[in-house]
Image (tube, rainbow, N blue to C red):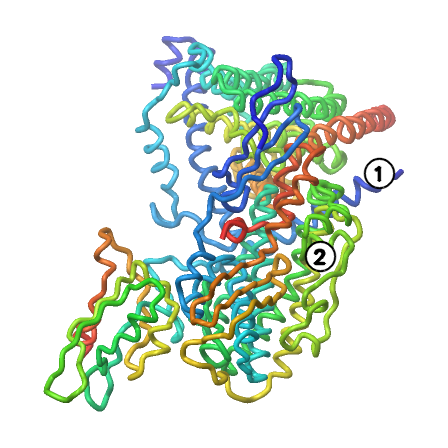
Amino acid sequence: MANPLPESAFEQTYYLNMGPQHPSTHGVLRLFLKLDGEYILEADPVVGYGHRGHEKMAESHFYEQFLPNTSRMDYLSGLIYNHGYVAAVEKMAGIAVPPRVEYIRVICAELNRISSHLLWFGTYLLDLGGITPFLYAFDDREHIMDALDRITGSRLTYNYCRFGGVAKDVDPEFARATRDFIKRLRSRFDDYHTLVTKNVIFINRTRGVGVIDRDAALRFGCTGPVLRASGVPYDIRRAEPYSVYPALNFDIPTGAAGDAMDRYMVRLREMEQSLRIIEQALDGLPEGPFKGRAPRKVRPPKGDYYFAVESARGALGYYIVSDGTSYPYRLKVRVPSFGNLQVLTEALPGTLVADTVAILGSVDIVVPEVDR
Amino acid sequence: MGLVRDVLVGSWSLITGMAVTIRRYGRRNVTVQYPRKRLEMSPAYRGHIELVRFEDSGRHNCVACGTCVRFCPTNVIKVQGEKEQARSKKRATLYFIDFSHCSLCGLCVANCPTKTLKFSNEYELAHVCRWEGVVDLIRRVEASA
Amino acid sequence: MWQTAVDILGPDVARLVAGAIGLVALVQINTLFLVWLERKVSAHIQLRLGPMEVGPHGILQTIADGIKLLGKELITPRHVDRKLYVLAPIVVFTGVLSCLVVIPFSKELQVRDLDVGVLLIFAFSTFNVLAILMGGWSANNKYSLLGAIRSVAQNIAYEIPLLLVVLNVMMWTNSLQMSIIVETQSTIWNVFWMPVAAAIYLICATAETNRAPFDIPEAESELVAGFHTEYSGMRFAMFFLAEYSNMFIVTAVATTLFFGGWKSPLWLDFLPVPGVVWFFLKVYALIFVIIWVRWTFPRLRFDQLMNFSWKVMIPVSLAHLVVYAGIIKIIG
């Protein structure tokens, strides 16, 4: 990073540190801004304040022992991280998965996606100053967490998927609770649209703010709602299909302008599509075992493997290099927030400082997953 | 004319937004006044590990094999056992788990050969001293007689 | 006792002293009540309960908070401008008390019925702006200064439409005296035939008191922590008191100018309810609306806030003035 002292005594610009401790940066993110009055000239995100060494931990643990770590990397999409890891190892070791398990994993992943987007919705509005929708979103999330609590036993760090299956079977009570939740959330969307989407103050804060054009998004490796709002309909569930997604009907919402309003609308519409997926999966849930045959200690053959899933923030990939033992040689996680964060170096310059929070919130970064 | 329309549409959106909030005003609140009222945990809730007391023998079945110790990612389990008589399986006499480091992964529960571990429903485990997080499971299972 | 006071001091001064004591008491009790009301209303809007522990349904919570603030150390940082730092909370409180002198709580309950009552209120309410600037400047902290400057700009920008709509009422009643304004509303309240003026007044009043959605200067803003960062303990409590009392004053003025003051609605005239009760009911209903608005909307960005005032509010209120001048000429 450049020397942060001003070049001359008559320098008009000054440096501002939106430091690691800040109420609106969604984690320990440090944004080093070079300002000219109110306008941002340069923005430099500094990460690493939350590094916990997950990938190093993977090298000294068995494949099974790494499972709790996966939930903690991005605690908002814990089940999707679980799913990705388990599917990657199953691909490596050639473990067959019963069809019921695939459906259960898809239902849980989509519930997790909705829960993550609801939390994003609440915290985004909290950053913009409207405190009430945060509590409404959390009230809806409680229902998801209660439903998932009944089968997984946890509310946040799920650790539900196992190699070849899931930890516990799904009972009809869960299906009933999920259907009730789907009905409830559908009726809630009207409230959210009236309270937030059509609100003139909100529209003025987000329309035209933080435009990320298609070219910049592709260059920086953005994925997920950020890329889709800029006009590229790329979704891992359709581009590199896995699990039972090829058999399910759903659309990929995209936006045109790539501003904060488009990202907001893409996420709300993704929630609606996730509800569709859950309904279809619940209707088509086959009977069968919930655990396949898997060895006690997985010992995959030598080689390197990559498996990508679509997390709430974008494309999540696990790259595992195995040397034939039951300890991975190298485990790398390709997290979506890393690329999404880097695009800020192009999206922030030229905007007002007061918009930083609006733009940062709309990109939906979870810093623990950037730092791992 | 465009400005007038914008102002009117904007004001209407504000008024409908206020209607949404006021409709929630009289609804039942969703919070629970802990600790005056407590919530029931679901049966699958993952509290700290405890030993199962089997009905037929009235005792736990831990043979101190050390599988849970080896599978634990954070090394929080400590087991010691001795044989009750020659040529029998060992029986655990000490079983400690340091719950302040346990990540509730469930690997110990899943891999126990005698299926003698299960999750409890305990969630009120705040303590002031670090060592109070260490739970003595043998004493706990004997106290639950 | 009242007779002895009148004998010793003379009727005017005795009334003033009694009024001053009453107003200070009103300010304290009003703040006590309003803090609790805000917490309860916001909690119920947000599907939760609010304070429930201290006293039945948390009524005594504010007293507990006040005791806590009283017990805090009055830290004066080293590099502040000491005179201004100490003076700012006092100035803001003085402005509040002075404004309350002319408000007609009922036909008899008015400390001083000046014939320039409205002018006095708007003059003394700018003490608020002065105190904010003093607080922000003296704190010797560039973020406090930034917050104070923004607050001053916002206050000045929103005072203009405020005064323009109040001019409408002045044109109709031909007087600045508060009690006469209430008397002219004995047949119909002003809000029913100038609703736009009342709406503009309420929006500008919300901006004047730095309440959401115009609360950039004081909320947990993105960069700055507001002009009262450097204040702790009782000095902070004074700013806090002044904010809630300001809310009371602007809604009291709105009630007097637009909602009929202490007069009961015509169809409820038969009820033996004293004017004071009607006055307070109306004031607290308006305060409820202000609190409701705070917890519903996100915040406006600062330049949007200023644009809204200069490009929307002022043209609308000017047009309103012209139109109503014509109507009043035709009617009266």
Task: Residue under label 2, please give it.
Answer: A266
Expressed as whole percent of the image width and height from the top left, the position of residue A165 reads 50, 79
Residue located at (87% from left, 39% from top) = B2
Residue located at (23% from left, 61% from top) = B134
Q: Mark 2: which secondary structure?
A: helix
Residue located at (64% from left, 17% from top) = A11
Asked whether C7 or A69 is in front, the reply is A69
Q: Residue furthest right?
A: B1
Residue B44 visible? yes
Count of numbered marks: 2
Expressed as whole percent of the image width and height from the top left, the position of residue C318 reads 80, 25
Quadrant where the N terminus of chain A lies? top right
Task: Residue under label 1, please give it.
Answer: B4
Please give the chain letter of the residue carrying mark 2: A
Query: Callout 1, which amino acid?
Result: Val
A88 is higher (above) or lower (below) than C98: below
Residue C187 visible? no
Task: Give left or right: position of B105 versus A308.
Answer: left
Mark 1 in CB contact with mark 2 (< 8 angstroms): no
Asked whether C160 or A333 is in front, the reply is A333
Res. A207 image quadrant: top right
Expressed as whole percent of the image width and height from the top left, the position of residue A198 reads 73, 50
A299 is higher (above) or lower (below) than C222: below
Query: Callout 2, which amino acid?
Result: Val
Task: Give left or right: position of C163 versus A132.
Answer: right
